[in-house]
Amino acid sequence: MNRVSEIISLLNGKKISHKRGTYHCDTANQSVVVFSETDTTGRVMLPTDMVLEWIQAYEFGIIKTEDKARAMRLKVVDSSRWAPFQHGFETHLAAIVAAWAAHKDSRKSVKARRSRGK
């Protein structure tokens, strides 16, 4: 399964959490990730390609799940192909990174149990 397929599976129709709240992903596809409105924002649409940039930054150790969303944004924007304002929904993007990290950690745990024969 490629990263885009994993992102779609991880987010489409699901809820993800961040310190600022819970975000419900209405749609995740090859092009966009769309979140429902919250008490503080309207609907949010993020390019899937930009979401990939954030995930790659996490996987390369440029950002960490412990980082504040603003700190993550400042690091990712430096090498992004997207305009800086596109990264403005940093808490949504940080929540995606946290969900991705949790997903990857759970997959590692499953693989470790399988390799031990459990």
Image: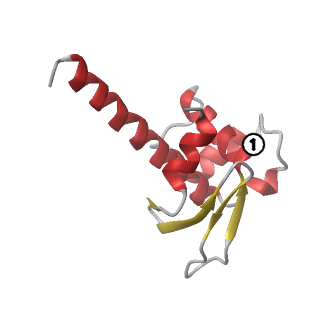
Q: As displayed, is residue 103 above or below residue 26? A: above
- Residue drawn at (48%, 43%), measured in percent from left and top? 100
- Residue drawn at (28%, 30%), measured in percent from left and top? 109
In-image side of 97 versus 47 (left or right): left
Q: Position of residue 28 (x, y in %)?
A: 62, 56
Image coloring type? secondary structure
Q: Position of residue 21 (x, y in %)?
A: 46, 69
Name of the residue lying farthest toward the bottom? 39
- Residue drawn at (78%, 55%), measured in percent from left and top? 86
**Where does the N terminus fall, quadrant-wise?**
top right
Residue 1 visible in the shown view: yes
- Residue drawn at (56%, 36%), measured in percent from left and top? 63
Q: Amino acid at mark 1?
A: Val
Q: Position of residue 48 (x, y in %)?
A: 70, 48
Number of numbered discs overlaid on the protein picture:
1
Q: As displayed, is residue 112 above or below residue 47? A: above
Residue 68 visible in the shown view: no
In-image side of 44 versus 102 (left or right): right
Name of the residue lying farthest toward the left? 118
Return the residue nearer the eye: 79 or 24. Answer: 24
**Where does the C terminus fall, quadrant-wise?**
top left
Q: Residues within 10 Å of mark 1 (few under 14, many from 20)?
A: some
Secondary element at image label 1: helix
Q: As displayed, is residue 30 above or below residue 14? A: above
Res 37 quadrant in image: bottom right
Mark 1 = which residue? 77
Return the residue nearer the eye: 75 or 56. Answer: 56
Q: As displayed, is residue 65 above or below residue 28? A: above
